[in-house]
């Protein structure tokens, strides 16, 4: 065995020369810590890569046995090995720490998105915190499907609103948001952030929003509100100042699109309020909300009322008219006769005692004077028409049967179209009446 302290002369010259020749012949770097040297007879020697120059120049340490075998491993300095081992241990720990923190950030992002946001983003959101829904989260699907059920809306007292404009109108009117889903922070910034402090904000993927949205092109924001109470909402001042003493009663309206359009017309005509009987479709149906374009938050809408309750929402001196779009174009001298025959009471013995008699109402074309004080207009459904209670209320208040003349061959008008024509005509007549009253008052003052 040859040690570092032994003289190099004791080592056979031929063996030393062969060793040095084969060592210098070629080498391959192995990893980061070792050097693999190819020696004589394909013997391989593993040395430290950082100290291989010193090993060749200063300390050619080897073990030679009598039979000519060589020790394959040349031991390096223990201190250097310990230092290298320490450095690589620290690197491994650092890598584990980085990978661990990355994994924790990936999962923590599902819990709170604000933890990853910059201070500038927090300032833009007015300090609001939101959650990030993980992949496969079905909360939006569950809420969207359940909130579209009328039974759920009535039981839980919640409604679903979709779209920036509709949500902004609801917030401006004082509706209370409970949960809001959005697909991008930019969509959230378009809303009045100061009114979302009490709501739970959840960021979801746009693909999930598109799956459960009723719109062809979703706007990226869906909100769950507490079911608004019309008596507690705050309506825009410009709408209140432009309103006229005109009331709309919806009787057995079953079509959601028609009801939404009628509500929109009522808001545009400046109606004071809208009353719906129990036979009407729910005002918070998604299709009604889309067709109404925010009318729910521009004038009071009182749904699901009995006829006994309707009189409590009307002034005492109101006159109730009914819209009848089944009357054809008037023929001189036959308008009244033909119309009265349809609705006149009959004393015939052939009529069943169980069938209620229809009250007699005088028909009148819509452009003649009929709105001269507080006026209510009843719009019936296209399938069931006007109810007996609506006709009786019109008779009690000395109302009339209003109709829109049509060309021959047309069966009837859509209920939404008939309502829009009559509502705007009623507004025109009431504004004329108010203008005349104001002029009379001014003339008396100057006299």
Image: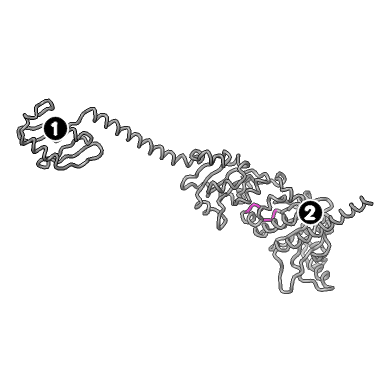
Q: Classify mark 2: residues with Cα within 10 Å, few (<14), some (14-19) or many (20+).
A: many
Q: Is the magenta stretch mostly helix, strand or loop?
A: loop
Q: What stretch of residues is rendered in magenta? A: 278-285
Membership of 86 in magenta stretch? no
The residue mark sitting in front, 2 or 1, is 1
Q: How was the colour assigned to the protein in this rendering?
A: one colour
Residue 257 screen position, x and y as percent: 65, 59
In this rendering, the answer to whether 181 lies above or below 367 is above
Toward which corner of the image does residue 122 lie, by quadrant? Answer: top right
Depth order, front residue of 251/114? 114
Q: In x, y percent, where is residue 201?
A: 56, 43
Task: Report the label total.
Answer: 2
Q: List the single residue furthest toward the right.
A: 447
Residue 228, image x and y in percent? 67, 46
Within 10 Å of disc 1 (Cα), the crowding (few <14, some 14-19, many 20+) is some
- The dot on residue 151 is none
Residue sitting at x 82%, y 63%:
361
Q: In the image, residue 223 lies at what x, y percent?
A: 59, 47
In the rendered view, would you say 38 is above or below 9? below
- Which of the pair 340/20 is nearer the observer? 20
User: Residue at the spot x=53%, y=53% of the render?
Assistant: 212
Lower sequence index among marks 2 and 1: 1
Identify the residue position indicated by label 2 in the image: 244
Kind of element beneath mark 2? loop
Which part of the image, by quadrant, shows the N terminus?
top left
Could you say which quadrant of the image residue 93 lies in? top left
Secondary element at tag 1: loop
Report, in whole angstroms, how far the alpha carbon at label 2 lies from the one at label 1: 109 Å
Against 316, is 406 above or below?
A: below
User: Answer yes or no: do the residues labelled 2 and 1 have beta carbons within 8 Å?
Assistant: no
Q: Is residue 351 left or right of residue 64?
A: right
Numbered badge on residue 60: 1
């Amino acid at each position: 065995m040859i040690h570092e302290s032994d003289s190099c002369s004791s080592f056979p010259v031929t063996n030393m020369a062969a060793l040095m020749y084969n060592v210098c012949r070629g080498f391959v770097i192995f990893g980061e810590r070792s050097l693999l040297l190819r020696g004589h007879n394909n013997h391989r020697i593993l040395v430290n890569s950082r100290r291989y120059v010193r090993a060749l120049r200063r300390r050619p340490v080897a073990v030679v046995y009598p039979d000519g075998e060589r020790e394959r491993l040349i031991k390096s300095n223990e201190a250097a090995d310990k230092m290298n081992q320490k450095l690589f241990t620290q690197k491994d720990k650092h890598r584990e720490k980085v990978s661990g923190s990355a994994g924790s950030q990936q999962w923590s992002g599902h819990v709170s998105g604000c933890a990853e946001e910059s201070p500038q983003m927090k300032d833009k959101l007015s300090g609001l915190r939101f959650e990030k829904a993980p992949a496969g989260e079905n909360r939006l699907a569950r809420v969207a499907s359940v909130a579209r059920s009328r039974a759920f809306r009535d039981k839980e007292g919640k409604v679903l609103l979709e779209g920036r404009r509709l949500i902004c109108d609801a917030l401006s009117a004082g509706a209370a948001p409970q949960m809001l889903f959005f697909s991008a922070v930019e969509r959230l910034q378009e809303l009045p952030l100061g009114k979302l402090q009490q709501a739970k904000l959840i960021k979801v993927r746009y693909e999930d929003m598109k799956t459960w949205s009723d719109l062809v092109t979703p706007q990226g924001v869906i909100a769950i509100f507490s079911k608004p109470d019309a008596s507690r909402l705050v309506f825009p001042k410009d709408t209140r100042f432009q309103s006229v003493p005109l009331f709309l009663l919806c009787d057995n309206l079953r079509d959601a699109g028609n009801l939404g359009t009628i509500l929109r017309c009522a808001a545009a005509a400046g109606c004071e309020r809208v009353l719906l009987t129990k036979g009407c479709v729910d005002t918070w149906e998604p299709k009604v909300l889309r067709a109404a374009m925010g009318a729910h938050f521009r004038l009071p809408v009182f749904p699901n009322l009995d006829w006994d309750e309707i009189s409590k929402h009307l002034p005492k001196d109101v006159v109730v008219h009914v819209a009848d779009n089944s009357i054809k174009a008037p023929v001189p001298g036959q308008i009244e006769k033909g119309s009265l025959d349809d609705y006149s009471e009959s004393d015939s013995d052939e009529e069943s005692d169980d069938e209620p008699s229809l009250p007699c109402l005088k028909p009148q074309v819509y452009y003649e004077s009929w709105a001269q004080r507080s006026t209510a207009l009843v719009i019936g459904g296209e399938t069931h028409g006007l109810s007996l209670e609506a006709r009786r209320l019109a008779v009690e208040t000395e109302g009339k049967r209003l109709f829109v003349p049509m060309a021959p061959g047309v069966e009837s008008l859509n209920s939404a179209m008939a309502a829009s024509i009559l509502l705007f005509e009623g507004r025109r007549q009431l504004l004329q009446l108010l203008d005349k009253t104001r002029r009379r008052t001014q003339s008396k003052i100057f006299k």
